[in-house]
Amino acid sequence: MQQLTLTRPDDWHLHLRDSALMQSVLPDTARQFARAIVMPNLRPPVASVEQAQAYRTRILAALPSGSKFEPLMTLYLTDNTSAQEIRRAKQSGMVHAVKLYPAGATTNSDAGVTDIRKAYPALEEMQRCGMPLLVHGEVTDPAVDMFDREAVFIERMMIPLLRDLPQLRVVFEHITTREAVQFVTDMPGNIAATITAHHLLYNRNALFSGGLRPHYFCLPVLKREAHREALGKAAGSGNPKFFLGTDSAPHAQHTKETACGCAGIYTAHAAIELYTEAFELLGALDKLEGFASFYGADFYGLPRNTDKIALRKESWQAPDSLSFGEHRLVPLRAGEFISWKICS
Ligand code: DOR
Ligand code: ZN
C-alpha cells in the first residue's frame, strides 16, 4: 500500500508541559490529532478542577491560529483528592479522567499516591460517576527489578483495586509487557490500555546499541523482544480494548544527555507516521484506523472524529533536534528515516 486515508486520530496519552516548552511542542500534536488526553504531571501538579481549567485555557491560547485541536484535561490523583473534587471534575465537562501515579514512579510523580487506600473516597466516586482512572502501572518498590515493575503492579495493585472497585473504568497506560496484554484482554470491558509507538517499534536493545542511548529511555522502560511482539499482536488484533496513546514526553536535550537523565521519549513530531510504520510491519494497516481513531473515543464516550488525514509511503529524514523553549529537544528517529508521511 502506498497511500492511506484515516479518520483523524486522537492521542489518548500526551505530555504537553507548559509555557514556552508547550508552545514549542503543541503544534506537532495539533497538526495530526483532533484531541488529546493531556497528562497533569506539571510542577505543581494539576490536582484541582481550577488548575485544570487554567491549564486548558493556556493550551488553547498557545494553539496555532485556526487549529481545532481540543485538549481533554485530566486531574492528578493525590492522597488528598476528595470525592467532592471528583464530582466537580465530572460536572465541569472538561475533565475527562484522573491519573494515578504511584509516588516516585516517574517524572513529577512525587505528589502521587503513597497508599492507594487513601485515594479510595475519590476512586469510589469515580466508579459511581463513570470517571476513568488512568494508571501508570509500575510498582515503586526498589527491591523489584526495573523490568518486572509492571508485571508486579498487576498482582499487587491492579487485581486488588479491581476486586474492590469492579465497575471502575480503568486505562492501563502505556503497557509494555505480555502480562499487561493478557490482563487487559481477560478483564471485562471497563478495562482498556494505551500502547505507544515506541514500545511497538523498539525493544530494550535500543537502549544499549553501541553505547548508552538516553533518547530511548522512558518509563515504563522498553522491554525484551517477546513483550514487544505481544504488544504488536494486541495493537494489530482489532481488539477495541487497545488504543493509541503516544506518551510523547519531551525533555530538553541536556536533561537527557547527562549522568542522571530524565525519562521520556518525544514522538509527537511524527506520531501517526511512526504508528503507521509499526502497523505496516505488523501487516495490520487495516487495523490502524480503529486503534488510532475509533476505540479511544468509544471508551471515553466521546464522538468519533469525522474529518480525515492522508498518509503517503515516502521516506523522510527526521530532524536532528527541534527547538524546545530556549533549549533543544531530540525526537525519536533524530537524523534517521521514517517511512510514512502525512500528506493532507
Ligand atoms: O517516560 C516517561 N516520561 N514516563 C512517564 O511516565 C512520564 C513521562 C514524562 O512526563 O516525562
Ligand atoms: Zn505519560
Image: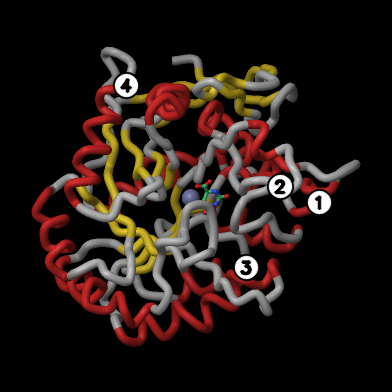
The residue pinned by badge 3 equals: 178
Q: Describe the element under mark 1 as helix, strand or loop.
A: helix
At horizontal 22% and vertical 62% (from top left) the residue drawn is 131
Report the amino acid beneath label 2.
Tyr
The number of callouts visible is: 4
Q: Earlier in the sequence, mark 2 or mark 3?
A: 3
Marks 1/4 in contact by CB < 8 Å: the verdict is: no
Q: Measuring from the top left, give residue 237's x and y in whole percent.
A: 53, 55
Q: Is residue 83 above or below residue 281?
A: below
Marks 1/2: CA distance?
Answer: 8 Å
Residue 265 visible in image: yes
Marks 2/3: CA distance?
Answer: 15 Å
The residue pinned by badge 2 equals: 202
Report the amino acid beneath label 4.
Leu
The residue pinned by badge 4 equals: 63
Report the amino acid beneath label 3.
Arg
Label 2 Cα neighbours within 10 Å, binned few <14 / some 14-19 / many ≥20:
some
Indicate which disc residue 205 carries.
1
Marks 1/2 in contact by CB < 8 Å: the verdict is: yes
Report the amino acid beneath label 1.
Asn
Residue 315 visible in image: no
Of the two numbered discs 4 and 2 in the rendering, the one whose residue sits closer to the viewer: 4
The N terminus: image quadrant = top right
